[in-house]
Amino acid sequence: MLERLREIIRELPPGVEFLIVVSWAFGLPIFSSILIVSGSDYSGKLVVYNNEALLSILIFEILQSAFLLWFLHVRGWTLEKFGLRVSWQSTGMGVVLLLITWCVTFGAQLLAQLALPIDMHAAASRYPKADPALSMQLVFLASTVNGIFEEVFVAGYIITVLTQARGLWTAINVSTVVRLLYHLYQGPLGVITIVPLGLLYGYMFARTRQLWPLIVAHVCIDIVSLSMVI
């Protein structure tokens, strides 16, 4: 029976594969994010990362990854196809990307403050907060799993598939839109920073075909962001 299931999976059209992977990986996060920003009491909501929330994210992404990686393995995907190769050079590129990320983040926020009618203090107040009682071990573990999970699927998978089918910029733009949708809960500040970072990360991956620098930068950003209040 399992072998028959594998045969069915292998015979799926590429479009069905894409729909399954993207909806399975990001469907629930996108839905939850949209619910948060569309709620009538959104002005009173505030996303807070505590130990329970991080543990839920950790379990969710491990289970999601287990299914998706098995599914894509049956479809013929390998780590090399995702662009996942670990080396000292790619780690160094990740550190450089991390520094560029901070520059882009601050630059985007500064430009938004100067050019758009946005109250940055109010926008910052809607940005998710971290519980001071967070476990540092859980922060490292959840940040590592989250960084790998997001970049493998939002960059490694989406950009690889769509570059072959629709071209480089379509792939980068779709990847950025998906990245933005599941970060909408971060409010205006998240939108201001996620769009340029999505374009930057997407372009870097599309050009270098190296996923590890994106993972290194993403994991470091998550760790620093969550540990700043601990």
Image (tube, rainbow, N blue to C red):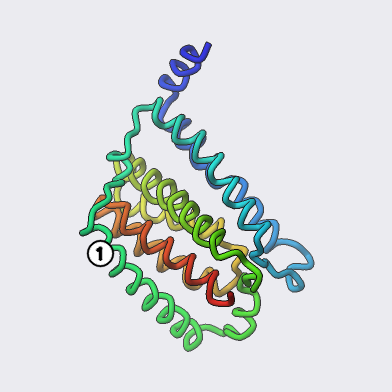
In this view, 101 is above or below 12: below
In this view, 19 is above or below 107: above
Q: Residue at x 53, y 43 (%)?
A: 62
Which residue appears farthest toward the bottom when viewing the image? 114
Q: For the C terminus, give its image quadrant.
A: bottom right
Q: Secondary structure at mark 1?
A: helix
Q: Position of residue 59 (x, y in %)?
A: 59, 46
Given residues 48 and 105, the one toward you in this image is 48
Given residues 44 and 169, the one toward you in this image is 44
Q: Quadrant of residue 121?
A: bottom right
Q: Position of residue 202 (x, y in %)?
A: 35, 57
Is 122 situated left or right of 87 in this image?
Answer: right
Q: Position of residue 133 (x, y in %)?
A: 66, 70
Which residue appears farthest toward the left when viewing the image? 89
Q: Residue at x 46, y 52 (%)?
A: 150
Q: Residues within 10 Å of mark 1 (few under 14, many from 20)?
A: some
Q: In the image, what residue type sits under mark 1?
A: Gly
To which residue does mark 1 refer?
92
Q: Residue at x 50, y 42 (%)?
A: 22
| Residue 14 appearing in the image | yes
In this view, 23 is above or below 30: above
Given residues 111 and 63, the one toward you in this image is 63
